[in-house]
Image (spheres, grey):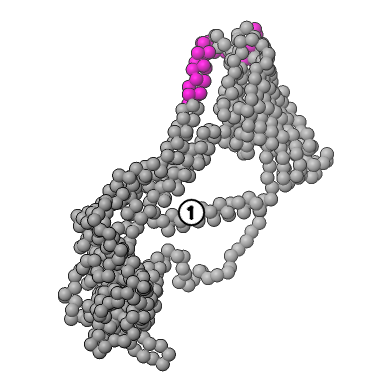
Amino acid sequence: MKFKNLLTILVLILILASAVNTIYASEDREYKITSAVIDLTVQENGLLHVQESYNYRFDGTFNGVYRDIPIKSGQNIENLHVETDGAYSTYNIENQGDNLHLVVYLWADEAHTQKISDRNVRVTYSYDMVNVVTVFNDIVSLQYKLWGENWDVGVGSITANIHLPGNTSNTYYLNPPYFNKSSSLNGNTIHAVTSHIPSGDFYELQVLMPLSDFPNATYATHINSPGKAQIEQNQAEYANSINFWGNVFTVFAMLCFISPLVPIIIYLIYGREPKVNYNGIYERELPSDDPPSVVNALIQNKRSIGKPNMNGFEASIMDLINRKIFEITVGENEHTNDLFLKLNQDRYDELNKCDRITFNIMNRFSVNNILNMSELSSKLSNETNGKWFANNFDLWKKTVANEYLNKKELSWYFNRTGTELSMIFGLLGLIFAFILFIISILSYHPSSDMALWGSIFLGIVSLITIFLPDDIFGQWTKNGRVYYLKWNNFKKFLKDNSLIEEHPPESIVIWNNYLVYGTALGVADSVYKAMKLYVPHVSDDDYYYYDLYTFHRYSGLIMLSSAFNTGIHASNASNSGGSFGNVGGGSGGGGGGAF
């Protein structure tokens, strides 16, 4: 996926999230359960008495609350009562198969005419549960969720008190343990306090009690088999699972935080440059006779060494002007001077594949072999022309790479092993970081917080690794290193007017080479400025070679850059949401409604 597309998706997600927040904000109300107090009393006959008190904070106007209590097969609820503090109430009870649905209507006045608004209300449910306690041959068990997964909101904290029939040989478990703030067993009472429990998770109690405490357990479920060993095994396996995930999150987080060691190792093995016997400070002459597109691909395009960019394409056009394949003429008008390129069709056959593509691109927008540079941008603003240009520009880049810098040729200059390994690390790192981020977000395990930050850190490291220049992790060969240093020093020479002043070129032909390769290296403006200073007069014999200076003088390179950028943008026009004025596509209109 292209980076621009990824950025678009992220922006859309942010817009959607903002819209959702706006919708919820428009309701102008919210509630939360600040705390809960749950008292369980296990009686000798196996009956479980439950009293639940939930402290609500309402901001805005509400009708009431509801409570769903799951009922398993064979179980039953009796003696249900509902009380409220902070509001008047009525309630309805509905049996919905395996669920008891309680709806509590809250009122601000005794006459039940005004809904509640902006207040604290405590709602207390009390009831008895039959056949919840289980009697095995060797133990009595109570497994009860103090907080279920199906609440709409979380709870700030739970205070639980569990009263048992006896005060000896009792064992209890509270799961998951990471919600426990404190717990204790004093005599026959278990006391526990939790931290915040979010919606979607549960908090469960399991108590093992001796058979002797239940002499006549008529309200309990009886199972004619031993249960203690299996329950203890289940608890041990659950604890191991919790510990396992804690270790997994911890290990993954540590791997994320030490992940920079991987690109560092890649750099140390493949990225350090070889020592070469070259100590030049600058280069006055062209270090090689390679085409400007090749120099551009190797020296200027550090994000993808071996592939030319737009500067290389513009330099190829400049080279064709220098070789008289394209000739420059200036048309003088009343207010402006138009710059024209005349395409020499008679010399087309002598061009190589790359230059032919360049020629064909310029020829597409010419009329009778004459291209008006001032009209090129408007022609490329057309979507069809823009797409055609973008496709042929890509073809030109691939042709340069295949003709001059295929895998074998490029290996003479540059070793891409480290670059490729760093790219693999970056892509795999992003995938792993994304997966770990999602798992950490969905998990309530305390160790998931560290894993969450680790995934973010890994994602950042991976992105940086992907977007670093190729020569950070890749390595120039000895031949390539000398090549790079010489051309880089030549670039420094072109940028430094003081050096050109000390060693000015002896002819306009050399200046032209400076302009062509300065364009390939991204410093054409510096060359042109120096040329204006140090070539103020041109002899008649030099005018034949003076097209490049004229091209720059009349902003030809600026017009090229502007036109080609317009073409690239126009090629993406169909993705920008533009309108062609179809029926029904105008502004205004809309509709409305209410509920």
The answer to if 487 sits in the magenta stretch is no
Drawn side of residue 117 relative to residue 255, left or right:
right
User: Which image quarter: residue 467?
Assistant: bottom left
**Does any portion of residue 388 appear in the rendered image?**
no
With respect to residue 163, does 383 lie above or below?
below
User: Which image quarter: residue 262?
Assistant: top left
Which residue sits at x=68%, y=13%? Answer: 187
Which residue sits at x=61%, y=27%? Answer: 180
With respect to residue 341, does 573 lie above or below?
above
Name of the residue lying farthest toward the front:
502
With respect to residue 439, does 289 lie above or below?
below
Which residue sits at x=39%, y=72%? Answer: 566
Residue 407 location in percent, x, y? 22, 55
The answer to if 237 sits in the magenta stretch is yes
**Frontmost residue, 263 versus 95:** 263
The amino acid at mark 1 is: Leu
**Frontmost residue, 595 versus 62:** 62
Instruction: Identify the residue under disc 1.
Output: 10
Name of the residue lying farthest toward the right:
110
Mark 1 Cα-neighbour bin, 10 Å: few <14, some 14–19, many ≥20:
few
With respect to residue 391, does 237 lie above or below?
above
Which residue sits at x=68%, y=37%? Answer: 33
Name of the residue lying farthest toward the bottom:
334
Residue 162 location in percent, x, y? 67, 20
**Does any portion of residue 415 appear in the rendered image?**
yes
Residue 526 location in percent, x, y? 37, 73
The kind of secondary structure element at disc 1 is helix
The quadrant of the image that shows the N terminus is bottom left
Residue 448 location in percent, x, y? 51, 36
- Tell me the magenta residue range: 214-241
